[in-house]
Image (tube, rainbow, N blue to C red):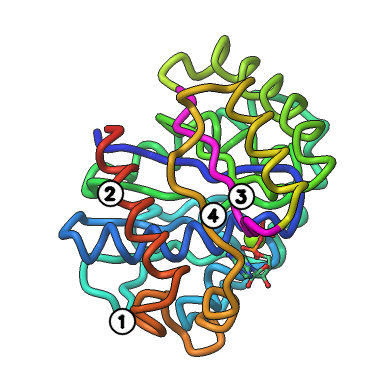
């Protein structure tokens, strides 16, 4: 079975979806059969790839999951669209672990034909994120270089540790990614230093700069590399992709 990278952070607006979209596109460009799974009821990854959300998320449907995979304009890149009704599932967040492991089994059982699967998580530590963690081989955490970045991170890591104990001993820390990096800010440099001191090698060498091209790309239905290949953002995502492939 290939890699399943869960992109998670319970905070919103830290760059999860942006990372998922750009990384998925670049892995596909590099020739990897790639699937992007949209688990966020906001469905930004789905619309970012020019698709409409499903009425009901395939994951809570009884049909075989692969019937719901859709192809995208990018060769080698498939999508499992999100659904807004998936909020219903997250509302069950405080119910049983067994439900989440059932979903995880359903998901993991259908991923065999891909080299790499990226899962874009919602901004919560609810059942959807736990399901993603339960079916993943690694977790990638984007964080924004701001004052509260570390605080949320320790909470997230507690949940990851729990999932690593049960039900998913295959799960590892894939990396921490510093996003919306602004080298001119003192605070950015401070968070960078602190995070690297604390987490060491787990932190990607690559940082994703704050770049307007990155935020504009989705409205043109493409990755930043296609939208503005020479931009700083595009170069950073290429670097990140190489680093991710290197870490396999
Ligand atoms: P999340 O999925 O964690 O909620 P998003 O990926 O949707 O976060 O990013 C939040 C917002 O920030 C979006 O409007 C996105 O376009 C913008 N954004 C993300 N990364 C960058 C960046 N490197 N430079 C500029 N804007 C960015
Ligand atoms: Mg998102």
Q: Residues within 10 Å of mark 4 (few under 14, many from 20)?
A: few
Q: Residue beneath label 4, please? A: 61
Which residue is labeled 1 in the image?
A: 73
Residue named by callout 3: 121
Q: Give the magenta range.
A: 172-184
The residue carrying mark 2 is 242
Mark 1 touches mark 2? (CB < 8 Å): no
Q: Position of residue 95 (x, y in %)?
A: 80, 30
Q: Tell me the mark number nearer the camera, choosing from 2 and 3.
A: 2
Gap in angstroms between the C-alphas marked 4 and 2: 35 Å
For the residues labelled 1 and 4, the Cα–Cα distance comes to: 26 Å
Sequence order check, earlier mark of 2 and 3: 3
Q: Is residue 182 magenta?
A: yes
Of badges 4 and 3, nearer the viewer stands 3
Residue 186 included in the magenta stretch of the image: no
Which picture quadrant has residue 176? top right
Give residue 245's quadrant in the image. top left
Residue at x 64%, y 40% (from the top left corner): 129
Q: Main secondary structure of the magenta part?
A: strand
Q: Earlier in the sequence, mark 3 or mark 1?
A: 1
């Amino acid at each position: 079975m290939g890699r399943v990278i869960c992109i998670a952070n319970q905070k919103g607006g830290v760059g999860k979806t942006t990372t998922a979209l750009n990384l998925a596109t670049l892995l596909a460009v590099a020739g990897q059969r790639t699937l992007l799974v949209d688990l966020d009821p906001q469905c930004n990854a789905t619309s970012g790839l020019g698709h409409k959300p499903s009425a009901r998320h395939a994951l809570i449907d009884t049909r075989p999951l692969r019937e719901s995979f859709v192809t995208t304009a990018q060769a080698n890149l498939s999508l499992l669209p999100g659904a807004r009704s998936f909020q219903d599932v997250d509302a069950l967040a405080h119910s049983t672990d067994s439900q989440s492991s059932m979903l995880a089994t359903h998901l993991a059982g259908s991923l065999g034909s891909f080299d790499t699967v990226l899962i874009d998580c919602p901004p919560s530590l609810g059942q959807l994120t736990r399901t993603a963690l339960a079916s993943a081989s690694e977790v990638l955490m984007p964080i924004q270089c701001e004052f509260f970045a570390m605080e949320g991170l320790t909470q997230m890591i507690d949940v990851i540790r729990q999932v690593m104990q049960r039900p998913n001993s295959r799960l590892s820390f894939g990396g921490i990614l510093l996003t919306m990096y602004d080298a001119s800010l003192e605070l950015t440099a401070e968070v960078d230093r602190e995070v690297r001191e604390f987490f060491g090698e787990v932190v990607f060498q690559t940082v994703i700069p704050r770049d307007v091209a990155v935020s504009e790309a989705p409205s043109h239905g493409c990755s930043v590399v296609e939208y503005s290949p020479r931009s700083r953002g595009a170069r950073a995502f290429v670097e990140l992709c190489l680093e991710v492939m290197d870490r396999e």
